[in-house]
Image (cartoon, rainbow, N blue to C red):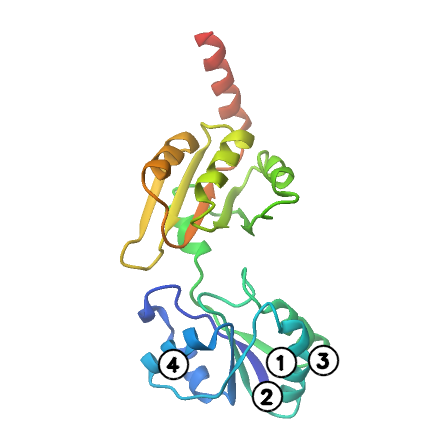
Amino acid sequence: MAKLYIVPTPIGNLEDITLRAINVLRDVDFILAEDTRTTSHLLRHLGIEKPMHSHHKFNEHATVGRVAESIAAGRDVALVSDAGTPGISDPGFLLVRKCVEEGIDVETLPGATALIPAVVQSGFPCDRFCFEGFLPQKKGRMKRLAELAVEPRTIVLYESPYRVVKCLEQIAETFGAERRVAVVREITKKFEQTVRGTVAEVLAHFKEHEPKGEFVIVVAGYDPKAEQTREDDENDVE
């Protein structure tokens, strides 16, 4: 039976593609790409020529039915996003759900994603963590941050470089300026960097150094004991 393959692609360093992913991209009948121009660059690097169709957040509602029909008719299809694993803050969920509903096999390959390297190198506990992806840009954003302020697990957020400073300001407001944070940018790329410290310290850094690139913000989970110690210290100073 034909199937849908979910294929992670490199988030920066093209050497992070797996041998299995290369073989799948070479063997499928066609590839669904978030941006065909971006995927064309990867395929040229890999020496693969394959028909592609656009599949992104603006058209996925309209295309999932036709794609499922193509797979049911015997055509193997690979879904890729511009970078990382489809479905993780990228299009993919709707197509996977449609295939599951239609009894079509879905095979997801392991591979590149920004959140795992970021949470591991943050230095915070990573046996359990809370992945939030991109927070709401406006409505509900502060409410969600207030809820996360008492989340005991390590928290992982994606953020645009244009909103990193504002996001850190909001975290300082809701979590407290002394909460520990690690901001990782440009994972796997030439200028990869991790800035660690309190929210206040990391915020000061990015106010001085303009944020550029792709960002993952990792925040230490809420620790009632540490919070009480901080409050006691502040009271002693007063």
Q: Are marks 1 and 2 in contact (CB under 8 Å)?
A: yes
Q: What is the distance, in whole Å, between disc 2 and disc 4 at their CAs?
A: 22 Å
Q: Horizontally, is 7 left or right of 95 in the view?
A: left
Q: Are marks 3 and 4 in contact (CB under 8 Å)?
A: no
Q: Which residue is mark 1?
A: 105
Q: Which residue is mark 2?
A: 2
The mark found on residue 43 in the picture is 4
Corner quadrant of residue 114: bottom left
Q: Nearer the viewer, mark 3 or mark 1?
A: 3
Q: Nearer the viewer, mark 4 or mark 1?
A: 4
What residue is shown at x 28% (from left), y 54% (from top)? 191
Element at label 3: loop
Q: Which residue is mark 3?
A: 102
Q: Horizontally, is 168 left or right of 148 in the view?
A: left
Q: Amino acid at mark 3?
A: Glu
Q: Position of residue 83 (x, y in %)?
A: 44, 66
Q: Earlier in the sequence, mark 1 or mark 2?
A: 2
**Picture layout, residue 2 above or below residue 110:** below
Q: What is the distance, in whole Å, between disc 2 and disc 3 at their CAs?
A: 13 Å
Q: Nearer the viewer, mark 2 or mark 4?
A: 4
What residue is shown at x 32% (from left), y 41% (from top)? 209
Determine crowd level at label 2: few under 14, some 14-19, many 20+ residues with C-alpha closer than 10 A: some
Q: Earlier in the sequence, mark 2 or mark 4?
A: 2
Determine crowd level at label 4: few under 14, some 14-19, many 20+ residues with C-alpha closer than 10 A: some
Q: Position of residue 94 (x, y in %)?
A: 65, 70
Element at label 4: helix
Picture quarter with the N terminus: bottom right
Residue at the outermost right position: 101
The total of numbered circles placed on residues is: 4
